Image: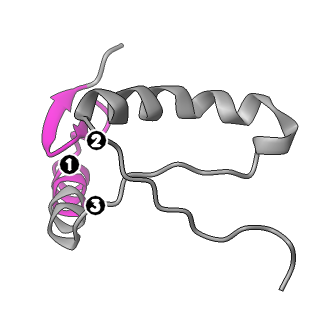
Amino acid sequence: RNDKPGLVIATLQSNEDRRKVMKAKRKLSNKDEYRRIYVDEDLSPEILTARSNMRTMLKITGSDNNYMVKGCKIVKKQL
């Protein structure tokens, strides 16, 4: 195995902390040393399935150009 770290799980104290981290994660790609670091939420299988089903419904109805899945809601895309 190489010297790169594997999966790191961080537990945050509040939703505000989570929101700040998720908002700032885009800045990682601006630095070469952090370009290959990814920050994702750990979602339950139920939420992942619900989101997938909503995306499938949008594709089937042809609404995927005007609407998107945000969280567990279908919202109109901002143009």
- Which residue is identified by label 1? 58
Is disc 1 in contact with disc 2, using a CB cutoff of under 8 Å?
Answer: yes
| Spatial CA span between label 3 and label 2 | 23 Å
Q: Amino acid at mark 2?
A: Asp
Q: Which residues are magenta?
A: 52-76
Quadrant of res 18 = top left
Q: Is residue 67 visible?
A: no
Residue drawn where x is 22% and y is 72% of the image: 45
Q: Amino acid at mark 3?
A: Leu
Residue drawn where x is 24% and y is 37% of the image: 70
Quadrant of res 49 = bottom left
- Which residue is identified by label 2? 64
Q: Quadrant of the N terminus?
A: bottom right
Q: In the rendered image of this protein, does residue 18 appear above or below residue 4?
A: above
Counting every numbered tag in the picture gives 3
Residue drawn where x is 58% and y is 68% of the image: 7
- Which residue is identified by label 3? 43
Magenta stretch encompasses residue 71: yes
